Amino acid sequence: MALPLAARKNTAVQQRGDRAVGFRFGGKWRLFLRGALLPAGILILWQILSGTGAISQQMFSSPWLIIKQYIQLTGSGELPHHLRISVVRASLGFLLGASSGLILGMLVGMYRSFEEVLNPTVQMIRTIPLLAITPLFIMWFGFGELSKILLISMGAFFPLYVNTFLGVRNVDAKLFDVSRVMEFSRFSQMLKLVIPAALPNILLGIRLSLSIAWLCLVVAELLGADTGVGYMIQDARSFMQTDVVFVGITIFAIVGKLSDSLVRILENQLLRWQDSYKG
């Protein structure tokens, strides 16, 4: 018995939807496999060279030994303990620095008077290497958590500040003319006009701030800490435990990549309106 016309249409629409979902998931898997080709090739070559003795396992370890250390450190609870502390430090430092960078970047971008007063000093401080400031942070705030969080926040501040400032200044001036005609308040201009228009730069600044926050975390934990992944690396280096050092390095790489991927997902959701070149 033939199906009614409406039923056939619904079936066709459902089949097209299923094919579209399958295509999206298939495309994501293909994208993942392409991105994994180079790391997988490096790991295979590394394991072969280590197994044949072409490179020293004492100096370079091997992927298999590193995986065994992952299992051992996770089972003992040592790795989750250090990772949790490092993630909390990086998160607090990033939130403090990024929020300050976003607010000041918006103010400096929106108001010429703020730019004239604040921007020269901020740009001057931005050029000072963090390693040069670290001893001062230790002298002022000691070896506790405060000095580490402030060091991380300082590193996370500048990328978001600069990109927010540039994003605001790149907003089309005609949009401000339209907002004045519509009698937008300054707050409404910032909320409804400036932030959406500057969002690509702001999200780029967030990605850069996250990466700098992890770099500063490593510096903070290597110079003075008794917990955290950086401390675990420093302690393993003292005892020539190369496999543990690589565990710490890969942990930073994995967590950094995950945080960056989360911001990329946010970009894809918030910047769907962009019709930019995809390569």
Image: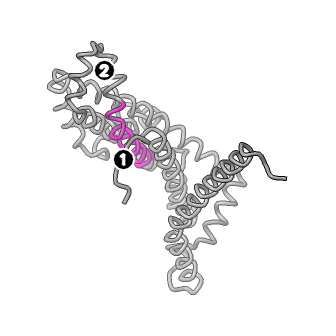
Q: Please name the predominant secondary structure of the magenta segment in the image.
A: helix
Relative vertical location of residue 166 with respect to residue 245 in this rendering, above or below:
above
The residue range painted magenta reads 196-217
Give the amino acid type for the residue marked by disc 2 in the picture. Answer: Gln
Closer to the camera in the image, 224 or 160: 160
Q: Position of residue 154 (x, y in %)?
A: 35, 36
Give the amino acid type for the residue marked by disc 1 in the picture. Answer: Asp
Closer to the camera in the image, 243 or 277: 277
The image quadrant that residue 180 belongs to is top left
Q: Is residue 60 left or right of residue 186?
A: right
Q: Which residue is mark 2?
A: 189
Relative vertical location of residue 190 with respect to residue 168 in this rendering, above or below:
above
Q: Is residue 210 magenta?
A: yes
Q: Position of residue 221 (x, y in %)?
A: 46, 46
Secondary structure type for disc 2: helix
Q: Position of residue 183 (x, y in %)?
A: 27, 12
Q: Which residue is mark 1?
A: 275
